[in-house]
Amino acid sequence: MRKRVLAVAVGVIGTFGLLAAAHHGLVVAWRGDGQLAQTAAATCAACHGDRFNRTSAESPN
């Protein structure tokens, strides 16, 4: 039972860790130049809305 709980805990933590790493990678790529940055910006906008495609002057926040 303890091994199963530990395995589930490691799996959940690992999954969130991978998601966080992927999100961080997209944010870093979005700040850069080139095609990868454009792809990352589109990916961010898909989840977070259009605010990632605006300049700071246009942003409502």
Image (cartoon, rainbow, N blue to C red):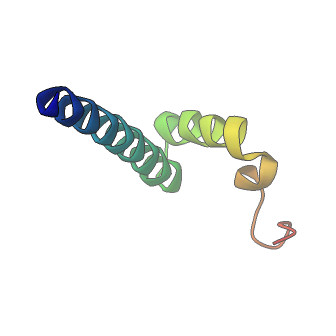
Q: Is residue 55 above or below residue 42?
A: below
Residue 36, percent from left and from top: 47, 36
Q: Residue furthest front?
A: 1
Q: Which residue: 74% across, 50% down?
A: 53
Q: Is residue 43 above or below residue 59?
A: above
Quadrant where the N terminus is found in the figure? top left
Q: Which residue: 14% across, 34% down?
A: 2
Residue 19, percent from left and from top: 41, 39
Of residues 4 and 22, which is closer to you in this image? 4
Residue 41, percent from left and from top: 61, 43
The quarter of the displayed image where residue 47 is located? top right
Of residues 24 and 59, which is closer to you in this image? 24
* Drawn side of residue 45 relative to residue 43, left or right: right
Disc count in the image?
A: 0
Residue 14, percent from left and from top: 27, 38
Quadrant where the C terminus is found in the figure? bottom right
Of residues 51 and 19, which is closer to you in this image? 19
Q: Which residue: 56% across, 33% down?
A: 39
